[in-house]
Amino acid sequence: MNSRRKFLQKLTTAAIAIQFSPDIIAASYKNVYNEPYDGPVLRVAIMGLGSYANRVAEAMRDCKKAKVVSVISGTPSKIKDWQSRFNIPEKNCYTYDNFDQIKDNPDIDAVYVITPNALHRSQVIRVAKAGKHAICEKPMAINAAEGQQMIDACKKANVKLLVGYRMHFEPKTLEIIRMRNNGEMGKILFFQGWCGFAIGDPTQWRLNKQLSGGGSIMDIGIYAINGARYMVGEEPIWVTATETKTNKEIFKEGVDETIQFQFGFASGAVASCLSTYAMNNLDRFFLNGEKGYAEMQPSTGYGPIQGRTFKGELTQPHVTHQTVQMDEMASIIFENKQPIVPINGEEALKDLKIIDAIYLAVKTGGKVKLKL
Ligand code: NDP
């Protein structure tokens, strides 16, 4: 058997293992990573060379199936810096004005949009029109209507739309999901998600509604929204929410500081969550079922994630989230692999529908029904 076939066989074994044991996912990654890889490599253009783009690109140095080959940026000095750091040829460097030309560049497979939230919609639509796969950071857009337009554009162009939900590949998270699916926690009754940090610099784009589309809910509360869905394993059917604003200078109209929100699920389970830009040390999930519980703290940071269940400590090894995410995205694009928790546009649209409903619930003070 040639080495490529052997490798693919190991990868398939790893993929099967992922479905059953997050312990094995990390071990399999290690084994697979120690072997040379000669399969297809996803050639990625990074758009928006800011703080998170740097983290993603550095993590991608360890990817087997994905590689940074191109940049799209409004800052010439950053383009130069990235060219030398990642060995990017001049012909693969673009600005926001001219990046539609990637349609004529056969050396780029996908564009990863890592810009302020309100820019995602138009940028992803342009990527799709250029015939390239679109990877977009969370939140995919600033409301559900925009999210739907992005899905439609990618469908029309026959390209994939994937969203940077890195927790969907995190081994301890997947172990809790496995235990829940296996019935080990019994009927799920309650989820609690606290997500927040003190925002700092009042001039940053995250506090400018034109660029952020909102406040803490868009940026950090979305982890509790998405987490409630993948932890409970069900879609919420209603939401209630209240907002607290202690500083109207920093958190202007339309930029939420702290929102508490609650979900109800058809099974009778409930969730209680907090999203804030005003407090540190809030990165905690708690899931309770009839037969057992799971808790994680930190639950969605860059890791190592820590947690335990009623059976003891979660011991799955730490993996660099963005490395695994990008290799998995390559498999989704090339092999149509189906992740345990989806990361496609439709998945992201559900979070946007919930965000729309949370803002409506804050405004009306009532219970808003959800149809996801
Ligand atoms: P940064 O401010 O650090 O970077 C954003 C970059 O976007 C800028 O450096 C700039 O790059 C580009 N940009 C284009 N237009 C503008 C504009 N009008 N104002 C400001 N920047 C602009 O933000 P982050 O990297 O922290 O966040 C970017 C996206 O990534 C957001 O959607 C955020 O939610 C998401 N994110 C996701 C995380 C995750 O864990 N999944 C973590 C952190 C962020 P250039 O100069 O090259 O044009």
Image: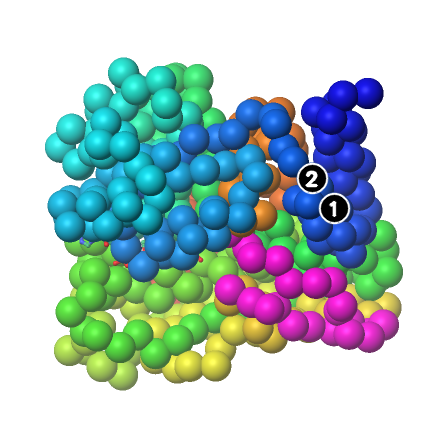
Residue 10 in view here:
yes
Q: Which residue is mark 2?
A: 35
Three-letter residue code for mark 1: Asn
Report ligand 1 position as a quadrant.
bottom left
Residue 64 at x, y percent in the picture:
57, 39
The percent position of residue 358, horizontal first and vertical second, equals: 41, 59
- On screen, residue 190 versus residue 281, left or right, reads right
327 or 239, nearer to the observer:
327
- Please name the amino acid that badge 2 sits on: Glu
Between 113 and 62, the one lying in front of the other is 62
Mark linked to residue 31: 1
Q: Is residue 209 above or below residue 13?
A: below
199 horizontally vs 10: left or right: left
Location of residue 88 in the rendering, given as x and y in whole percent from the top left corner: 31, 37
- CB contact under 8 Å: marks 2 and 1: yes
The residue lying at 51 percent from left, 67 percent from top is: 301
Q: Residue at x 48, y 47 (%)?
A: 61
The residue stretch that appears in magenta:
302-322
- Give the dominant element type of the magenta stretch: helix, strand or loop: loop
